Image (cartoon, rainbow, N blue to C red):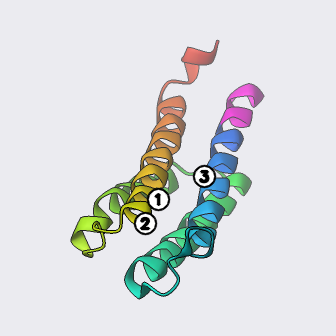
Amino acid sequence: MPSKLMEGKKSQDWINLVLAICLFISPWVIGFTAAMVPAWNAWIVGVALGALALATLSVFAEWEEWVNVVLGLWLIVSPWLLHFAADRNVMLTHVVLGVLVVAASAWAVWDFRHPHAHA
C-alpha cells in the first residue's frame, strides 16, 4: 500500500481519536454529567471509539472502521432510543459527533477500497 494512502488513513484515525476524546469529555464540557444515561453513553462510546482509533493507528483493519461507522450511527440515534433528545445541547452533541465519526470512518473505508483514487 502506498505510504501516502497510509498517511491518509492515519489522519482519519487521528480525527476519530480527537472525536472520541471530545465525546468522552463532553459531559463535563457541555454540563450533563448529572444526566446519567447520556453521560454514560458518551463515556462508553468515547472509550470504544478511542480504543479503536488507537488500534487502527498501529495496524489498519477495515473491520475497525466499520465498527466505528456503527458506533457513529448509534450516537446519531441514541438520543431518541435512550430518551434524552429533549435536551437539545446533549442531543446535538451526540448527533454532530456521530455524523463526524461516520464521515471519517466511511472516508477511511472508501480510501481502503479505492487505493487508485490517490494516484
- Is 116 magenta? The answer is no
From the image, tell me which residue sits under label 2: 90
Q: CA distance from mark 1 to mark 3?
A: 15 Å
Q: Secondary structure at mark 1?
A: helix
**C-beta proximity under 8 Å, tags 1 and 3:** no
Estimate the x, y position of residue 112 in percent, counting from the top left: 53, 34
Q: Amino acid at mark 2?
A: Val
Query: Which of the 4 image quarters holds residue 2?
Result: top right
Query: Which of the 4 image quarters holds residue 8?
Result: top right
Q: Which mark is residue 68?
A: none
**C-beta proximity under 8 Å, tags 2 and 1:** yes
- Residue occupying image coordinates x 65% and y 39%: 9
Quadrant the C terminus occupies: top right
Q: Amino acid at mark 1?
A: Thr
Q: In the current view of this chain or complex, which residue is farthest to the top?
A: 119
Q: Which span of residues is magenta-colored?
A: 1-8
Estimate the x, y position of residue 70 in percent, counting from the top left: 37, 57
Q: Amino acid at mark 3?
A: Asn
Please tell me which of labels 3 and 2 falls first in the chain.
3
Query: Chief secondary structure of the magenta span?
Result: helix
Tell whether 34 sits left or right of 78.
Answer: right
From the image, tell me which residue sits under label 1: 93
Tell whether 92 sits left or right of 26.
Answer: left
Q: Which mark is residue 16?
A: 3
Quadrant the N terminus occupies: top right
